[in-house]
Amino acid sequence: MQTLQFYFEHQPNSHRIAVLTLSIIIFWNTENIIALNFDYRKWRHALTNSFFTLTDTPVQFLLGIVLAYSTA
């Protein structure tokens, strides 16, 4: 476990982003292949989540800036 932690501590952010993106793609496709619930509307749910993510990101960014300035 420490080897894996050491690897990610010393890699550029682009590698971390690539691993995260690849993981999401793999799990998304695995869920499609081994779907247990066929009535689940995955794309509609994904669009809803994307909407919430896109509207929440600027708020979280601004709150992060406020927190950084208030603790400094």
Image (cartoon, grey):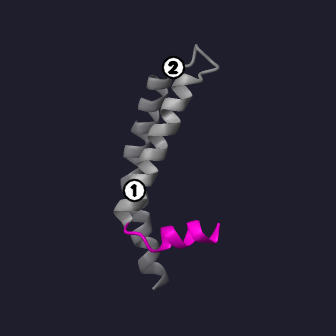
What is the count of numbered marks?
2
Quadrant assignment for the C terminus: bottom left
In the rendered view, would you say 59 is above or below 72? above
Q: Which residue is mark 1?
A: 17
Residue found at the far front of this picture: 3
**Looking at the picture, does residue 52 appear above or below residue 2?**
above
Residue placed farthest to the top in the image?
A: 39
For numbered disc 1, what is the local secondary structure?
helix
Q: Could you tell me what secondary structure mostly forms the magenta stretch?
A: helix
Farthest residue to the bottom: give it: 72
Q: Which residues are magenta?
A: 1-12
Judging depth in this view, the residue of 8 and 59 nearest the camera is 8
Q: Which mark is residue 63?
A: none
Return the disc, 1 or 2, that comes first in the chain's sequence: 1
Find residue 54 and report its horizontal and vertical position in percent. Answer: 37, 45
Amino acid on which disc 1 is placed: Ile
- Mark 2, other Cα within 10 Å: few <14 / some 14–19 / many ≥20: few
Name the residue at 38% across, 45% down. Answer: 55
Q: How many other residues sit within 10 Å of disc 1, few (<14), some (14-19) or many (≥20)?
A: few
Q: Nearer the viewer, mark 1 or mark 2?
A: 1
Q: Residue at x 53, y 37 (%)?
A: 27
Where 67 falls versus 18 (above or below)? below
Question: Does the magenta portion include 10?
Answer: yes
Residue 63 % position (x, y): 43, 64
Q: Position of residue 31 (x, y in %)?
A: 55, 29
* Residue position for label 2: 41
